Amino acid sequence: MELQINGKAMTADIDPAMPLLWVLRDVFNLTGTKYSCGVAACGACTVRVDGQAVRSCVTPVSTVVGKRIQTIESLGTADKPHALQQAWIAEQVPQCGYCQSGMLMAAAALLEKTPKPTDAQIDEAMSNICRCGTYQRVRVAIHRAAGAVK
């Protein structure tokens, strides 16, 4: 099966029913995407598929063949962080950090669709769960990044 992950064609002999999360982590060693609940409730496993936020723990890999898959590993680099990553740091969003890759991918999907979101749009789009409760900081960081994201 051939997948388009982070701008690269990647091929593996995998069960079409295998969740995308396990393909990313166990087959391709892209471990930035996290496992938490396994039932699409928390959002720690969020990646982007053709620009949309998708919970990879319940997404069969067969449903994303031929689509653009983006994981946290491709959002920015150490030398050139994405505007969201810069805003996350500036607003001190992460505490434990476990949910942050999923949060960032959901926020990136939001800003791609809605470059200047309102608080209500952010609240609707950001259904990820953060045990540390940094939701207010997430909102402020998204607003900050919205000024820099093209």
Image (cartoon, rainbow, N blue to C red):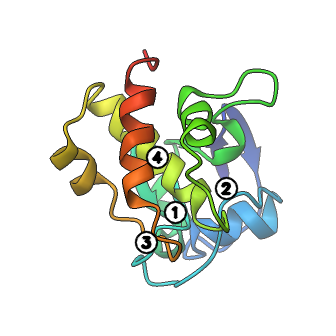
Specify which label sits upstream in the sequence, 2 or 1.
2
- Around disc 2, counting alpha carbons within 10 Å, would you say few (fewer than 14), some (14 to 19), or many (20 or more)? few
Specify the amino acid type for callout 4. Val
Q: What's the residue at 26%, 31% (across, down)?
A: 114
What is the C-alpha distance between the residues marked 4 and 1?
13 Å
Question: Which residue is label 2 attached to?
Answer: 1
State whether residue 121 appears in this view: yes
Q: Which residue is mark 3?
A: 129
- Callout 1 amino acid: Ser
- Which residue bears the numbered disc 4? 49
SS for dot 1: helix
User: How many C-alpha atoms fall within 10 Å of the one at disc 3: few (<14), some, or many (≥20)?
Assistant: some
Q: Earlier in the sequence, mark 4 or mark 1?
A: 4
Q: Classify mark 4: helix, strand or loop.
A: strand
State how far apart marks 2 and 1 are (Cα): 8 Å
Res 62 label? 1
Eye-nearest disc, 3 or 2:
3
Dot 2 amino acid type: Met
Cα–Cα gap, marks 3 and 2:
32 Å
Question: In this orientation, which residue lies closer to the viewer: 2 or 124?
Answer: 124
Classed neighbour count for the residue bearing mark 4: other residues with Cα under 10 Å, few (<14), some (14–19), many (≥20): some
Q: Position of residue 29 (x, y in %)?
A: 83, 59
Q: Tell me how many marks there are.
A: 4
Q: Quadrant of the C terminus?
A: top left
Q: Which mark sits nearer the N-terminus, 3 or 4?
A: 4
Question: Relative to 77, is 15 above or below?
Answer: below
**Mark 2 and mark 1 residues within 8 Å of each other at the beta carbon:** yes
Q: Considering only order in the chain, which callout, 2 or 4, is on the residue closer to the N terminus?
A: 2
**In the image, what residue type sits under mark 3?**
Ile
Residue 42, percent across and down? 44, 75
Task: In this rendered view, identify the residue nearer to me: 115 or 63.
Answer: 115
